[in-house]
């Protein structure tokens, strides 16, 4: 059990890391959700280490969040579609596509057809020649060969694209939560003319939730607010996480690493599992002591923001 | 052989669809049904016995023309899938589906294949046709980000649809005097959570009185205590909301009052 702690922390405990998590006053324990305990038995150290090692992202920053969709297009004799989450999330929140436009969070589940996007559904909602390039005019901008896809997200192009955005050391190297909080990007939250009617968070969810894990000394900090700027309640509740008070107790790190629960986004699009400290305050990020560059508070504050 | 494989595959898909509608796997993405599948009910009581194709009942196509009450009170359709026990004989005698599907009001029950797919391929074709019909319908109705992606209440208020609420010879005439159109404010227990405004008016147009009173809601205002836990478990509001009426993830539709200070 103690070894697991060691693996998660990958080093000693570091002071104040994520200002969205740690600079806040400790949570007053009023609501039972703050004392939620996960009682799944801890995983074997070796298995956990292997799993975590598989789950962390080591690819090129420019390709993090890219999807190659080949299933349907190759059946129809078209080149696969290369989709970049990064270029889209600069302008639109997750909510716009994954709620309003009905894009599934699971690859291959949406079932996009040519008929659909020609009728203004899915990609066709914006790619109509008015908001973005039209689906009928520039097929080869999306239907590209794989090698072309990787060259378009080469490191120099990626660096240009993310210049001026707050940095991290993992994934696509952008701290998107900070980018939206500091106003470096202003993604739209809806395609409708009326503003989104969102229920304000109840008081006990205003601050990050702090849960104990099944491993002593490991705390999980979950900030609702960092999520609700991007997502709608419906993106997570009740599908991924039950709304029932303390209903979701059956999830643990293993399930996350298999792409369930948090792993739905935090392995593919949102910051990858390399960023341990973002959810486990006090822990170092994965690989931060082996050349990746330790992510300290100083480097966070010093990250570029043109408007400051 | 190839065909058989395909058939099995499609049967599997339909079964998967059915389970996705009735129960979803927690923790997995893809839990939410697609807008054209929201409110679909798989009626497979007879199909299970006779190895046939299940009937996919689409709430959206019916509620665009009829109130909930008409079928669930006057025609005695149960709120639980497969609990009504519809038989061919019943339909022929003008009960259940046969009340309207008589060849006069709409297509007759003798056109079996309109609801009972011949085989799995046919089921897939029907599904594709239904999706097209759904997308055509959505174009004329106010939109919502949730459920069917149709704001049914607004559609009803703006007379974009007129829900039929009376069938000659079946329904009993109602006295308008009895109608309650009050807004009931409700205070949630959690601090900081916006208050709820329950609109009788919005419900009455669809459900009348009998679908909610006296079960599960006592007639006395505020007497019935409930929690989101019970509601997400399919009780109280959850009897309809989350299955057919707008889903429970549309928080601000009920929690719409400014937060009490």
Image: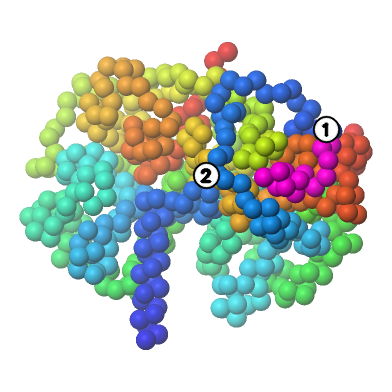
Label located before the other in sequence (2 or 1): 1
Q: Which mark is residue B119?
A: none
Q: Which mark is residue A16?
A: 1
Direction from residue B60 to residue A3 in the image, left or right? right
**Disc 2 marks which residue?**
A250
Which residues are the magenta region? A1-14
Residue at left 36%, top 63%? B15
In the displayed structure, does residue B66 sit left or right of residue A216?
left
Work out whether residue B220 or residue B27 is closer to the camera in this orientation and state it.
B27
User: Which percent across, then down, holds residue B88?
Assistant: 12, 60
Counting the numbered discs, the total is 2
Whether residue A11 sits left or right of residue B258 in the image: it is right
Q: Which residue is drawn at the image coordinates 21% and 48% (left, top)?
A: B83
The residue lying furthest to the front in this view is: A2
Kindly identify which chain the residue marked by label 1 belongs to: A
Which quadrant of the rendered structure holds the N terminus of chain A?
Answer: top right
Secondary structure under the numbered disc 2 in the rendered image: loop
**Whole-percent x, y for residue B227 in the image:** 41, 27
Where residue A19 appears, as percent x and y from the top left, is 80, 33
Q: Position of residue A78 (x, y in %)?
A: 63, 77
Quarter-of-image position of residue A186 = top right
Q: Do the residues marked 2 and 1 share a common chain?
A: yes
- A145 and B130: which is toward the camera: A145
């Amino acid at each position: 059990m103690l070894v697991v702690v060691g693996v998660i922390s990958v080093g000693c405990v570091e002071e104040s890391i994520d200002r969205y998590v740690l600079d806040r006053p400790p949570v007053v324990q009023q609501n039972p959700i703050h004392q939620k305990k996960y009682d799944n038995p801890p995983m074997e150290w070796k298995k956990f280490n292997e799993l975590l090692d598989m789950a962390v992202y080591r690819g090129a920053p420019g390709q993090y969040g890219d999807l190659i969709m080949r299933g349907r297009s190759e059946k129809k004799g078209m080149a696969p579609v290369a989709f970049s989450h990064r270029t889209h999330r600069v302008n639109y929140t997750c909510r716009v596509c994954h709620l309003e436009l009905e894009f599934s969070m699971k690859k291959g589940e949406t079932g996009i057809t040519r008929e659909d996007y020609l009728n203004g559904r899915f990609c066709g909602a914006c790619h109509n020649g008015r908001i973005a390039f039209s689906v009928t005019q520039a097929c080869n901008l999306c239907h590209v060969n794989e090698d072309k896809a990787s060259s378009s997200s080469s490191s120099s192009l990626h660096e240009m694209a993310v210049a001026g955005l707050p940095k991290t050391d993992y994934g696509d190297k952008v701290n998107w939560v900070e980018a939206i909080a500091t106003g470096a990007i202003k993604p739209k939250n809806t395609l409708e003319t009326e503003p989104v009617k969102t229920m304000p968070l109840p008081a006990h969810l205003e601050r990050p939730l702090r849960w104990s894990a099944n491993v002593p000394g490991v705390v999980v900090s979950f900030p609702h607010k960092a999520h609700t700027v991007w997502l709608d309640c419906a993106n997570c509740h009740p599908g991924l996480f039950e709304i029932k008070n303390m209903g979701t107790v059956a999830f643990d790190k293993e399930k996350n690493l298999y792409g369930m629960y948090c792993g739905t986004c935090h392995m593919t699009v949102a910051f990858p599992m390399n960023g341990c400290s973002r959810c486990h305050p006090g822990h170092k990020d994965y690989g931060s002591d082996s050349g990746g560059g330790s992510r300290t508070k100083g480097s966070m504050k010093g990250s570029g923001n043109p408007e400051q | 052989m190839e065909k058989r494989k395909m058939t099995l595959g499609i049967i599997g898909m339909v079964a998967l669809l059915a389970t996705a509608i009735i129960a979803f796997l927690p923790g997995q993405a893809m839990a939410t049904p697609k807008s054209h599948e929201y409110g679909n009910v798989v009626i497979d009581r007879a199909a299970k016995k006779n190895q046939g194709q299940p009937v996919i009942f689409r709430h959206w196509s019916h509620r665009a023309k009829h109130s909930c009450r008409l079928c669930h009170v006057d025609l005695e359709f149960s709120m639980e899938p497969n609990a009504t026990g519809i038989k061919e004989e019943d339909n022929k005698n003008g009960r259940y589906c046969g009340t309207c599907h008589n060849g006069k009001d709409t297509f007759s029950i003798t056109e079996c294949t309109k609801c009972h797919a011949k085989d799995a391929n046919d089921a897939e074709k029907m599904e594709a046709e239904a999706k097209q019909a759904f997308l055509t319908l959505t174009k004329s109705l106010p939109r919502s980000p949730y459920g069917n992606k149709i704001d049914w209440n607004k559609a009803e208020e703006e007379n974009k649809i007129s829900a039929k609420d009376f069938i000659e010879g079946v329904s009993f005439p109602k006295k308008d005097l009895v109608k309650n159109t009050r807004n009931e404010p409700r205070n949630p227990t959690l601090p900081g959570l916006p208050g709820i405004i329950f609109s009788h008016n919005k419900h009455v147009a669809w459900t009348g009185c009998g679908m909610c009173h006296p079960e599960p809601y006592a007639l006395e205002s505020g007497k019935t205590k409930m929690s989101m836990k019970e509601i997400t478990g399919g009780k109280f509001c959850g009897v309809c909301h989350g299955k057919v009426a707008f889903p429970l993830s549309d928080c601000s539709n009920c929690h719409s009052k400014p937060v009490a200070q």
